[in-house]
Amino acid sequence: MKIAGEITVAAPRDAVFQALSDAPFFASCIEGVRDLKAIDATHFSAVLETRVAYLRFNFSANVEITGLSPPEEIKAKIEGTPLGIVGRLTAAATTRLIEAGGQTVIHYEIEATLTGKLGSMGQPVLMAKAKDMEKHFTERLLAAFAAGGPGVAS
Amino acid sequence: MTPFDLVEPHSFEETIGLIEPDDPDVRVIAGGTALMLMMKAGVFRPRRLISMRKFASSLSGITATSSGELRIGAMTPLSALEHSPHVSRHAPVIVRTMRRLSNVRVRNVATIGGALAHADPHMDLPPVLIALGASVCVVGGAGERTIPVEDLLTGYYETALAKNELIAEVRIPAPAAARSAYCKVTTGSADDWPALGIAVTLAAGGATVKSARIAVSAATTKATRLTEAETALVGSTADDGTLKDVADIAAEEADILADGRGSASYKRELLRVYVVRAVRAAMQASGAP
């Protein structure tokens, strides 16, 4: 499953890069993330709780920043283990920042794979949920910059 | 599966009283064929299931009114629809759909109400019922109301039902010289869950399409009507040029989602091809939907 899109933020590229590479701010833009812990400068763990209709999905997730090229690109690898379901979520995310006349275009691509029972039963419904989460992430990110930047918002 | 309580009330009213609207882990179960799969996979872990089995017979049955409307009790098993002379006469597309809907063991247990309330977009019946213009009669704490099936389904596993409402009956209007077809595309066996489902009901005056209802499923988050494609079809003779336009409009209009049975681009192409086949099949079907 591939998720790709663009978000245009009315802020300079350096500021956007700074915000996106700040793990607590990044996590605050994702609905349902809690217990974010920094293991070291490039490794983080968190719990993701998400809900679709009457179903609840809980993931214990590990995130590794695999590439950081300021102020242009951030690459990350995510591994999630669902609680109570046999399976695994693995994802590779690439974010590129492009300058566009004082604004910054965030171009993102996430390639995610769900295996086991999670994949066969959960994939369609989680993919539908991913669209909602994408929209929610965009709204929170834009709201943070509209409020004067992530530092002010958080 | 994790342990859970099973409650078996003896009436519809008692069932409604047992629902806990604020606890999603308390769930009403009809045939249970879909819910059991989710429970075995660990996707759904209920605290309590409220079974409607004890009074299923009072909510089962198929009748046809004098005007030709079909009334089907919510707990009617799918196999009863498959073998009903009323359904065969008034909505033969349902009988044809049953032949590739899972297997006889599932059809003997799964119910029409459950197939709608479960709201999995991969179900075969919802697009067919939408194309037929069906509605559901629902009963709950606030009394009784009727909802068209196209408005009942609101998202993946989500419906317009209030938390203390249950489907009591499905109503399919009189055919009105309509013709219907359902095309199911699977990437596994013929009776597998579909990669795409498309249902069409047409009313034709001579060679001209007078009205059309087209519904897509399995490639979208819910069974959905394609109203722009319908508009493009109405007034035409369903000629090759029109059908090409209908295919393009349908592929553009549907909000396609990938799943384990195909990518979004693959499903979009399937829709482009199968909407044409479904319209042609409906045009060639006999004069009952």
Image (cartoon, coloured by chain):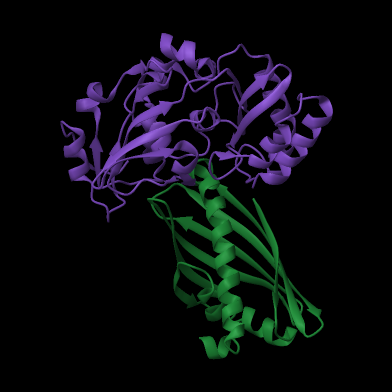
Chain colours: A green, B purple
Q: Is residue A39 above or below residue B271?
A: below
Q: Is residue B90 above or below residue A54?
A: above
Q: Quadrant of residue B265?
A: top right
Q: Is residue B129 above or below residue B178?
A: below
Is residue A97 rendered to the left or right of residue B37? right
> Quadrant of the image for the C terminus of chain B?
top right
Q: Residue B150 at x, y = what percent?
A: 50, 39
Is residue A15 rendered to the left or right of residue B87? right
Q: Confirm whether residue A42 shows in the render.
A: no
Residue that sits furthest to the top in the current view: B85
Q: Residue A64 at x, y = what percent?
A: 60, 70
Residue that sits furthest to the right in the current view: B241
> Quadrant of the image for the N terminus of chain B?
top left
Q: Going 49% across and 68% down the picture, which residue do you hit?
A: A31
Q: Residue A145 at x, y = what percent?
A: 61, 84
Q: Quadrant of residue B244?
A: top right
Is residue B114 rendered to the left or right of residue B268? left
Q: Confirm whether residue B41 shows in the render.
A: yes
Q: Residue A66 at x, y = what percent?
A: 67, 70
Front-most of B168 and A67?
B168
Is residue B194 rendered to the left or right of residue A13? left
Front-most of B14 and B239?
B239
Q: Going 71% across and 16% down the picture, which residue do you hit?
A: B206
Q: Quadrant of residue B7?
A: top left
The number of numbered badges drawn on the structure is 0
Q: Going 52% across and 33% down the picture, which residue do you hit?
A: B130
Front-most of B127 and B102?
B127
Q: Is residue B200 above or below residue A46?
A: above
